[in-house]
Image (tube, rainbow, N blue to C red):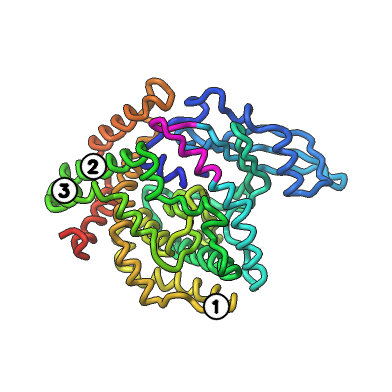
Amino acid sequence: MRVSSHLVTQLLQLKVDAASSSPSVTPDSLVTEDHVRAALATDKGAAALLTTWTVVDFTKKGDNYASLVTSVEVKYELDGNSSEVVYVVKINTGKTFGGDNMFDLFFQKECNFFLDIAPQMNSVLKEIGHTDINVPKCFHASLEEGKEVIFLEDLRARGYKMVDRKQGLDKAHTTLVLRELARLHAASLLLQNRTPKEDFGEKYPLLKIKMAYLMQNYSSLCKAIEDNVAFAKDIIERVGGYEGVSAWINTIIPNLVDIFDQMECGEPMVVCHGDCWNNNFLFRYSETGHPEDVMLLDLQLSGLSVPTADITYLLHTSMTGDVRKPNIETLLGSYYTTFKDVMEAGGKTASFTQAQLLRDFKDRNLAGSLFAIIFVPVLLFETEGEVESSKGNEDDLEEKLRKTRDKAMEMLDTNPIVKSRFLSIFDEMIESGIIP
């Protein structure tokens, strides 16, 4: 599994394996027997007796970003029977970028979600006859400085799989994600309504840390985002025929923080996933191959925002234009129906109408389009390990990013999905009047 930090690290193309960038930070050095015992007791009960455990990596080079992700295979005895279980383990590498230590914060945010927020939302959902939020079960988490780990359910055992991140989500996959986001948003709103006099953001201050805040407080992140927008301009100029877009990009670069801040403000404020792109979802399929369930991964950028912040991020970063554009109203309708059903089951009315949701989505299209401008080129031109570090540490990330961009420009004319995933964003922005 992979910002919270995935927005940040994907857009930077930080293809540095955490073990090689920080030799002292390895699964074997940070996953301890005490961690394994704690996870096993939570999962199987105090009577489960640990027999053996082994760290087994299952990611390929380049899959680890701000967090190192591995697995632990556990053998145990329970009621006289020998059994096995596998846990997915996320490890904080302690890396920095440009001298900024953002990743500790991201790790804390994810722990906060799994240990405090999700259990309370699930309690609300259970009371109204609904199932838990579809996120991996968390069996153990530690925020001990220098030894931060999270033990999560291995969803592979339940048949969940990742889609091809370069191709984008179709309507069926996107509908599943939107319905689950609606359950997340509605459950968080019902939870807040139980203590209306209490400021949810004050109770969980990490939820107030969102993209605009990060850009204002971490200059390295702000510069990286500005650079990626400029990179999008380079692509547009290389393609040709988008001269107005190129000029428009020049005008928005100084205003990126304000654009993201406006996207994250409004009513109602709900707990958002914060990093809704297709690599942060796993799907389970029917025997005929139809997607029938989804799990939300990587809640490292979860925060209080408006529902359409998640929705516009998802639809612009994770779909091709020919799927997104004709299905906007239908997709938003699927979200709204689920949101309304959960709110009414909790004895509350939906705080907005479907028409208002559509208007708000359109009003925030600029920010959603920006996510795509920043994010999609890195995804489309990912080189599967071809762009390697010469030093193997965080000091050469600028060099790696430059090489990645150079490689991307070489691939521009031969990449078959540039138009459907990237250029379609600008076509829609021109058509809607966002770009004059």
Instruction: Tell me the CA gap for discs 2 and 1.
Output: 45 Å
Residue 15 shows in this picture = no
Specify start and end residues of the magenta stretch as a single range: 95-108
Instruction: Tell me the CA gap for discs 1 and 3.
Output: 46 Å
Looking at the image, the residue that sits furthest to the right is: 80
Tell me: residue 103, above or below residue 138. above
Q: x%, y% of residue 387? A: 35, 29
Magenta stretch: residue 105 in it? yes
Mark sitting on residue 45: none
Q: Amino acid at mark 3?
A: Ser
Give the residue number, with chain letter if any, for mark 2: 230
Residue in the image at 62% along x and 54% along y: 116
Give the residue number, with chain letter if any, for mark 1: 348
Mark 2: which secondary structure?
A: helix
Using the image as rendered, state which of residue 289 and residue 208 is in the foreground: 208
Give the residue number, with chain letter if any, for mark 3: 246
The C terminus lies in quadrant: bottom left
Q: Amino acid at mark 2?
A: Ala
Magenta stretch: residue 57 in it? no
Q: Earlier in the sequence, mark 2 or mark 1?
A: 2
Residue in the image at 53% along x and 47% along y: 109
Q: Are marks 2 and 1 in contact (CB under 8 Å)?
A: no
Occupied quadrant, residue 405: top left
Residue in the image at 60% along x and 50% along y: 155
Q: Earlier in the sequence, mark 1 or mark 3?
A: 3
Residue in the image at 52% along x and 27% along y: 19
